[in-house]
Image (cartoon, rainbow, N blue to C red):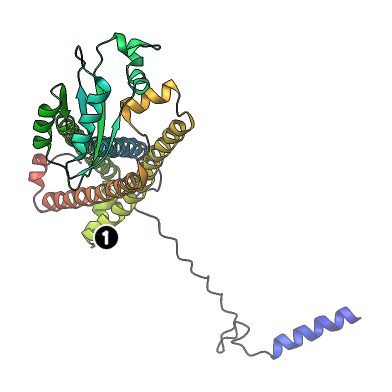
Amino acid sequence: MNEMSRIRNSKTEGANRPPESRGENRETGREQPRRVEMRVRPTAPILPPSNIQGNALLVVIAIMAFLACLTLGAVTMVRATAESWQSQISREITIQIKPEDGLDMDAALKKARDVAMTFVGTREGTIMDDSATARLLEPWLGSGLDLKDLPVPRLVIITIDERNPPDFGAMRDLLKTEVPQASLDDHRTWVDRLVSMAHTTVLIGTGILILVFTAMVLTVIFATRGALSGNRHIVEVLHFVGAESAFVAREFQKHFLLISLKGSATGGALAAILFAVAGFWQSSTRATPQSDQATALFGSFTIGLTGYLGIFATMLVIALLTTLTARFTVMKTIDEIDVIRSDPARSDGLPNS
């Protein structure tokens, strides 16, 4: 009984409601069909976010970014090593005394040091004793040397003020007068060679970077034209119905910007990790033959904050070049579409997109 009462009450309430609330027409009394709710289809990008061409381009950009960052890091490392060598050589000069019969070597070494220390710009003079000289010759002549039996020159190392160096010409003349067996080496030849080597290395690295960037730009051009070839009908329809060229170019620009950011970030991160691992290996294996040989050949593998900032800047430059190249390529293709539309006979003279 209770259930039947609730049904009658619901029918009575429905009958008492106004026709508009029941979906009925006031004039005919018939129930109107309800309108179907309209749903807006979500928009999709002009280019698919991931396809074969995009994945291949991402790998190529990652490889080129790795090579570019590796070259930049190597140039930074070599420059830092050359500047360190140059600074160390510039801080010292060497007085060499050749042994002769009847020469008191110890007295000659002390006299040469005292003569050098009389000049303004010298800071400290150190006479290399027999044990230090033997250690210098040990890689070539072996251990257990008796320098008294060998005509080995002896050295005096003079530390100088780099900002206010002494008069090397006057020092050389005075040494020749006071100690005829002495000769002064101010290392200018070695400094000039190191500077030339650093400049040559920078030029070679810059040339390699230019080649890598050129190859990357050409690759992006071909990849963009390939993407346009697969989606040319979409571009033409959008262009013909009134879509602005800037809008179409902006869509391609976003697509290739995302690819270039992923690729350059991957390549730059791999290069940075490689330098970090090499620096850690060098620091953890210090004073071993392998590490000493690597340090002698390549210097320190640490590129420092400047090198890592350069890697980050290279990543941004690669992304910018890729984006601008994609935009210019799309704008040129749209111009070709306009030329063909205005004069179809001229389509034979245009390159295939």
Image quadrant in which the N terminus is located: bottom right
* Element at label 1: helix
Dot 1 corresponds to which residue? Answer: 247
Task: Give the camera-side residue of 13 and 311.
Answer: 311
Vertically, is 260 above or below 239?
above
Q: Is residue 71 left or right of residue 179?
A: right
Report the label total. 1
Task: Give the camera-side residue of 85 and 230.
Answer: 85
The residue positioned 30% from the left and 33% from the top of the image is 126
Q: Amino acid at mark 1?
A: Phe
Q: Position of residue 151 (x, y in %)?
A: 24, 12
Determine if residue 207 is in view: no
Image quadrant in which the C terminus is located: top left
The residue positioned 10% from the left and 39% from the top of the image is 348
Task: Give the camera-side residue of 194 and 221.
Answer: 194
Determine if residue 324 is in view: yes
